[in-house]
Structure formats: structure tokens, C-alpha cells
Amino acid sequence: MPSSWSTRREVSPETSRLLIERAHEELIGGNDRDPRLSQIRPLVQDSWRRSLAHLVGAEALPQPELTDEELEAYRKAHPLAEAMGMIRQLLTPDAESGVVIAVGDAVGRLLWVEGDRSIRTLAGRMGFIAGTNWSEAAVGTAAPGTALALGRSVQIHGAEHFNRFAQPWSCTAAPVHDPETRRVLGVIDVTGGADAATPQAQLLVDATARAVEGELLVARLRARAAAPPAPRRARRAAPDAAAAATTLRVLGRDRALLEVAGPGSAAVTELSARHAELLLMLAVHRQGLSAQRLGQLVYGEDAEGTLRAELVRLRKVLERVAPQLVPATRPYRLSTPLHTDAHQVVALLDRGAHRVALTAYRGRVLPDSVAPGVEEFRESVRQALRDALLAEGSVEVLLAFADTDDGSDDTQVLRLALEMLPPRSPRRAGLVARIEKLEA
């Protein structure tokens, strides 16, 4: 096998980037009779139309569908986990290969994203990270989702992507099938520059998918040969590792939403402002809180009597909609993890996915709450987002942050964006005017 992906480059796509971009704009604009569309590959045309049917935005970023804890549990239970060693060996010849390797599940969620560190960082800015959904229904035309939609290997070159943020990239992907039932288990993708979508790349990705299927079959046969006879009594199926998850949505909301997800379904309950504050504090302070400390965080004073009465009411709500979250006592604590959308934003920042984090940031934590603990957590999330964007964010992300309530009057953010813009950028004049107005 060649030692670097750079040796696999062969030819550029037949249709020029400019033609594809203009045809894409015409289709997005509703002109599906533009003659330029006839010069686009039928595979891409069909995928673009499916993307429109799914109401995918041309600049929509994929949203994380799994928290870090859910992702880790799901990966361990996924059938492709045992094949990751083989995939790495076949597709990542060296640490600076110039590509990233992604392995997703049958619905397009990326479970592993590995490979060249610098390329992985750049790809993370468009949301190409573990836990996000890259199906056609989520992001439109892209090799992972289109390969799953068609059930065969696919290559997407640059501007052929439906999402404009993905258009600097090229990719090759192939589905992986169960070797016995032929049910789709997942997808293997290679993403990078033009070298990631050559004929040689497609052969290699296809061969890797077939090798994985063969390895899975061999492993099963060995396990069956070594296993004792199964008892006559049927065993109950093990629950899906990621089947049950609870998320508290507090960003941009005064009445938080509690989402309880199960296999194929989800229940959503709107909480009162006080119940949202209590549950958020227990989610933030996972080690537990005394009644006195919890009262201080929520009421600003020692209010044990009021606190206990409110906790009784919260317990009744949770017993009905999420009994696993009923708080334990002495100290007050949650026995099972409760994820929040605010923690998810911080986790995305830690991964370097700044653009996705900003998209996931729907607003301040419980914005009207004056509970001291909520105010402290609200500020810590806002500051984490701001600091990360100032330190490592691109100019596009900084400009997007400047359009939010948190960044609209932040002159440091505006000045940094101004420094990063090209000298002749038409956006400079507007930034200068905003800065002058704020500093007047």
C-alpha cells in the first residue's frame, strides 16, 4: 500500500467547480430547469433533490446527537468497534496522511473520526466530529450519507456537496453490511482534499469495507465454535447502550425542557422555572449538595423549609416522567447522569468544534433566573465560549458570535474579527461602524 495518500491522486472532477456551484445555486433557488444542471453527475443531482426534499439548509451545521457519555457507551456496544483496529491499519498509513477517517452507524451518525490531526481540526469546524449526524437528511449530499442512501460506495468532489461549509472537501465512503443478514451496520468514510476522492481511494475504501465484513464473519464463527450450547429458555435481549438518555435543555429558555429518550421515541416535559433551577444545580454539582448549600444556590439564602417543599413537588414530577432522576438525599444528588445542552456546548469547545458549539449555543442559561448558582453557571458557559472563540475561532465564527446577544457589544471580538478580515473585505466598513458606535 502506498505510504501516503498524496500518491493516489489521479484526475480532477470532469465538471468545473464554478459550473457546479452555479448549478447548485440555481437548484437551491428553485430553478431546477437551469441547463447547467444537466451537466452535473446524475448521482449528485438526485442527491441534491433528496436534500431539498429533506428541507436541509445549504449552510446548516450538523447537530450533535450523542453526548460524550452516550457516544462512549454506544461505541463500545457497536458491532464495528471490534473492526476499528483493521480500519486504522488499512486507511491511516501515517500520522500525516492528509485525510481523516470516519466510521459511522447505519443512520449516519459519526462514531469515530481519526487521522491527520491538522486536517481533523479543520474538518471539525464544519461539524465533522464524532457524535454528529452526516446523513443526507441532516446535511445533504456528502459521501457518508449518500453512500448509506444508495447502499454502495460513493465519491463526492468539492462543490458537489450540498452544504457550502463542506464544499472545500472531497470524500469517499462505503457502507458496511452485516456479513450474514446484509443489513447495513455503518459506513466508512475518507475525507480530505482531492486525493481523498480518486479511483484508487474508492478501491481502497471498498476493499476495507469488504475486509471488515469478512473479519466480522470470521469472529462470529469462532465465537460460535467456542460457545457452550445455548439454554432452551430464550434470553432477554440486552438493552441498547444508548437507548435511554435524559437531557435538560436550558439554553435560551426560562422554562427548561426535560427530554427523556428511549428506543425509537422521546418524551419532552416543560419544567417550571424553579424546578429547572433545582435540576440544573443537581446536574452541575454531580457530587451532591447539602440542603443548606442547595438552598443558597437556588434561593440565595438558607431556605431549607421552602427548598424541601419544592423538592417534594419536583419529585412528584420526576416520578411521572423520569423516575431515574428522582434525587437521592444526604446529600441531594442525582443517581444517574443528567446531560444539559450547556455542558454539550462546552464539550464541543473542548473538541475544537467552535462553529458547531456556536450553533448549539441557543442563548444564555435560563436567562431570567436570578438564582445565584444559575447566574454563576450561566457566566461560566458564556465565558468559556467567548474565550475559546477569541483564542482559536475563525473569522467566520467570530462574526457569527458578534451577531448574538452575547457578542453584539463585545468590542474585543469585533476588533479581532476586523484584524482577521482581508484588507479589501466589504465587511470591514460595517465592523468599523459598529466599533465606533460602541466606543463613542
Image (spheres, grey):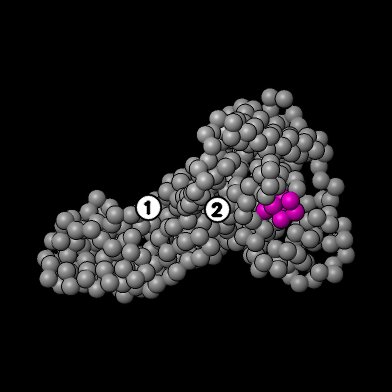
Q: CA distance from mark 2 to mark 1?
A: 21 Å
Residues marked 2 and 1 touching at CB (< 8 Å): no
In what quadrant of the picture does the N terminus appear? top right
* Amino acid beneath label 1: Ala
In what quadrant of the picture does the C terminus appear? bottom left
Q: Position of residue 100 (x, y in %)?
A: 61, 39
Q: Nearer the viewer, residue 262 or 399?
A: 262
Q: Which secondary structure class fits the magenta region best? A: helix
Q: Secondary structure at mark 2?
A: loop
The nearer-to-camera label among 2 and 1 is 2
- Residue identifier under label 2: 132
The answer to whether residue 299 is left or right of residue 399 is left
Q: Is residue 304 visible?
A: yes
The answer to whether residue 59 is left or right of residue 389 is right
**267 over 79 or under it: above or below:** below
The earlier-in-sequence mark between 2 and 1 is 2
* Amino acid beneath label 2: Thr
Q: What residue is drawn where x is 51% and y is 55%?
A: 64
Range shown magenta: 145-151
Q: Position of residue 137 (x, y in %)?
A: 65, 61
Q: What residue is drawn where x is 60% and y is 49%?
A: 105
- Residue identifier under label 1: 384
Total number of numbered discs in the rendering? 2
